[in-house]
Image (spheres, rainbow, N blue to C red):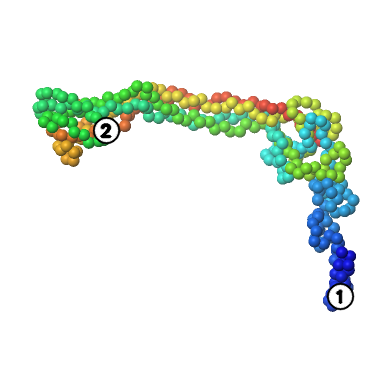
Amino acid sequence: MRARLFTIASILCGCAQVLGVDKIDIGDAQGAGGGGASSSAGGGAPMEDCSNGKDDDQNGLTDCKDPACGGFACLALPAMGWSGPLAASFGATADKCPPGFVEDAAGGFGQLTVPAPTCTMCSCGKPVPASCQLERLQFYSLNGCGGNVPQYNVMMANKCEMHGFASYPSVRAKPINVDLQNAKCDPDGGVATLPPASFATAVRLCHASAPASGGCGASESCLPSAGSGWTACISSPGDVPCPSGPYGKRTVISTGVDDTRKCTPCTCAPPVGVSCSGKTMIYVDTGCATLKATLNPDNSCVNAGSQSLIFMPDPPGGSCAVMGGGQATGGATPKGTTTVCCLP
């Protein structure tokens, strides 16, 4: 290896004489072609990585002890049963964690504002399963609906059918009966929109996403700064006193909300005004090709002989009134207690 380096150095020296320069700097031959810490521009000493626990720039100072790591600080480790150190924000900056941090908990303290839910308007659908019976026709042996009165019950809707009373010269269509057994209207609406409940002071706790680095004492941790508006804190579940040490500013927060807000269910009154209608077209032939007359279900007499018919029903009418529902109800209360202790 030394012989090879000597040969390379000799060649470079010869190149220097040809090029007319004093020397060519080959740097650290042992590091040629290898990896390692990132280097400063121009191939000088490596830059300090403040989160790997190493003295990258080889100045004898690691991470938090190195002046190059001005954005990091040594923070006291928490007592047993406490989490941290954490970055805590109280108030306006508590909407999200800063870059390089991950949420540990969120909540707040002080008065809990709980806006009422908004409810969509209730409505009722059409009566179901209200259904219309098929039409009934009365055929007469004389014009003007006189003489013998045989009744014919239509067998199907919207289909051509022969009725068998071709010799009867007059006919009338009877009112159509409606079947309301178990009929009801399905309610719709009463859907709640819940505006967020909010504490007088919002709190967010975040921990550094990278592991703690070195350069601090045995009871300390080197962590990055979270920036303006964030404070170094520790936390513990429940309402407990702060442990002895630097984290003495105590705040008890709620970490959740028990939300029971909703809208009362919509209800509908029984169906009213349900009626059935339709029309019956009668034809002079057996295949419903040549129309003779159209009958309405109102007992009107029509002088018209026929051999076939088509009954075309209308959907049943009627409606249901809204009985109630769609009213905001319920509320919200704080839940989940955590004690947060911060640096003064």
42 sits left or right of 143 in the view: right
Other residues around mark 2 within 10 Å, as few (<14) / some (14–19) / many (≥20): some
- Eyeballing the image, is 42 above or below 12? above
Q: Residue at x 85, y 30 (%)?
A: 244
Element marked by disc 1:
helix
Quarter holding the N terminus is bottom right
Mark 1 or mark 2, earlier in chain: 1
Instruction: Name the foreground residue: 187 vs 28.
Output: 28
Q: Quadrant of residue 329?
A: top right
Quarter holding the C terminus is top right
Q: Given the image, on which type of amino acid does mark 2 rest?
A: Ala
Element marked by disc 2:
loop
Residue 82, given in percent of the width and then of the height, sits at 79, 31
Residue 335, given in percent of the width and then of the height, sits at 67, 26
Q: Residue at x 13, y 26 (%)?
A: 140
Q: Quadrant of residue 45?
A: bottom right
Residue 7, given in percent of the width and then of the height, sits at 87, 70
> Does the image show residue 260?
yes
Instruction: Name the foreground residue: 49 vs 93.
Output: 49
Q: Residue at x 14, y 23 (%)?
A: 149
Residue tagged 1: 14
> Does the image show residue 252?
no
Q: Residue at x 52, y 27 (%)?
A: 263
The label nearer to you, 1 versus 2, is: 1
Residue tagged 2: 157
Instruction: Name the foreground residue: 325 vs 186.
Output: 186
